[in-house]
């Protein structure tokens, strides 16, 4: 006796030995035998496959909405991609899919405790299947393409491997390299601007000391310094900010006054500034 999805109760006396064995094992709570019997039962297997397909599709759709590792495109994230962390992410978000792949590979969770060929092979297989379902899930393939691109792989080899589903196409790889170059150029510009700001402020401060050393109070207004040889808007703003900070912390009558001591202190700060090294 069993209840089908429509709500009808069906009473049936099984005649085949498979069903009888299955019912006996369920009644005896022999779950290993039950699972083996289900996988061999010709009437249950089609329903089981449909159920697993629905669960995996639902898992995968939710996984793609979670900001997963397979959709990263940032060069730094691609460089730090970990097959072990990727498999752990899949295990959490797609447990049924994870264990289906694990069983297909003949592996256990204990086999994945260390980074090794099994971990990388399973990660590549999962990433390739994911990319078949959604082309945006290509982080592993971009990573492989980047490594091969910088290793001097031939154009024809990239085409062959792309057809095998191992890496991206040559055009996609070149496009990714251009994006990486743009990001590196941005880092260079930030590094360059930091140095120019410091050097501009330092040169302007030294010129102020040289030309106004005898004055009791320095004139550091922009109209006065705009004609100086080392004047620049960036350097002036940096110098003015440091002078204001230093003068505000001074004590006594010289508080809030631009004195020679104040600008000498600022020069020392600018000279001692350590800039990040560009790699």
Image (spheres, rainbow, N blue to C red):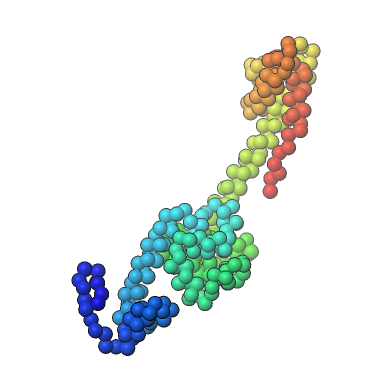
Q: Nearer the viewer, residue 2 or 267?
A: 2
Give coordinates of residue 146: x percent, y percent.
58, 60
Q: What is the tally of numbered marks visible in this picture?
A: 0
Q: Is residue 98 visible?
A: yes
Relative height, residue 274 to residue 39 (above, below): above
Q: Residue at x 48, y 61 (%)?
A: 92
Q: Residue at x 54, y 52 (%)?
A: 74
Q: With 191 as the anchor, is 70 left or right in this view? A: left
Residue 195: quadrant of the picture: top right
Q: Which corner quadrant holds the N terminus? A: bottom left
Give coordinates of residue 134: x percent, y percent.
42, 61
Q: Nearer the viewer, residue 204 or 218?
A: 218
Residue 251: quadrant of the picture: top right
Residue 26: quadrant of the picture: bottom left
Relative height, residue 46 to residue 71 (above, below): below
Q: Is residue 35 visible?
A: no
Q: Residue at x 47, y 68 (%)?
A: 98
Give coordinates of residue 191: x percent, y percent.
65, 40
Give coordinates of residue 183: x percent, y percent.
58, 47
Relative height, residue 40 to residue 218 (above, below): below
Q: Residue at x 69, y 29 (%)?
A: 200
Q: Residue furthest left?
A: 8
Q: Nearer the viewer, residue 16 or 215?
A: 16
Q: Nearer the viewer, residue 144 or 227?
A: 144
């Amino acid at each position: 006796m069993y209840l089908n999805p429509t709500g009808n109760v069906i009473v049936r006396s099984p005649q085949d030995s498979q069903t009888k064995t299955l019912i006996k094992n369920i009644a005896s709570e022999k779950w290993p035998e039950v699972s083996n019997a289900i996988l061999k039962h010709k009437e249950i297997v089609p329903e089981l496959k449909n159920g697993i397909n629905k669960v995996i599709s639902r898992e995968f759709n939710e996984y793609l909405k979670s900001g997963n590792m397979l959709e990263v495109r940032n060069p730094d994230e691609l460089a730090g991609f970990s097959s072990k962390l990727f498999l752990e992410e899949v295990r959490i978000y797609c447990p049924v899919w994870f264990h289906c792949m694990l069983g297909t590979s003949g592996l256990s969770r204990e086999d994945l405790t260390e980074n090794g060929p099994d971990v990388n092979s399973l990660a590549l297989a999962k990433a390739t299947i994911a990319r078949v379902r959604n082309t945006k899930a290509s982080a592993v393939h971009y990573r492989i393409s980047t490594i091969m691109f910088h290793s001097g792989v031939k154009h024809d080899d990239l085409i062959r491997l792309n057809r095998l589903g191992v890496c991206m196409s040559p055009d996609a790889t070149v496009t990714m390299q251009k994006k990486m170059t743009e990001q590196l150029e941005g880092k260079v510009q930030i590094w360059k601007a930091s140095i120019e700001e410091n050097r501009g402020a330092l040169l302007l401060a030294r010129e102020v000391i040289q030309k106004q050393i005898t004055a009791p109070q320095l004139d550091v207004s922009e109209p006065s310094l705009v004609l100086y040889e080392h004047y620049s808007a960036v350097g002036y703003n940096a110098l003015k900010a440091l002078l204001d900070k230093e003068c505000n912390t001074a004590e006594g009558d010289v508080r809030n006054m631009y004195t020679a001591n104040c600008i000498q202190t600022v020069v020392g700060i600018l000279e001692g500034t350590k800039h990040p090294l560009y790699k």
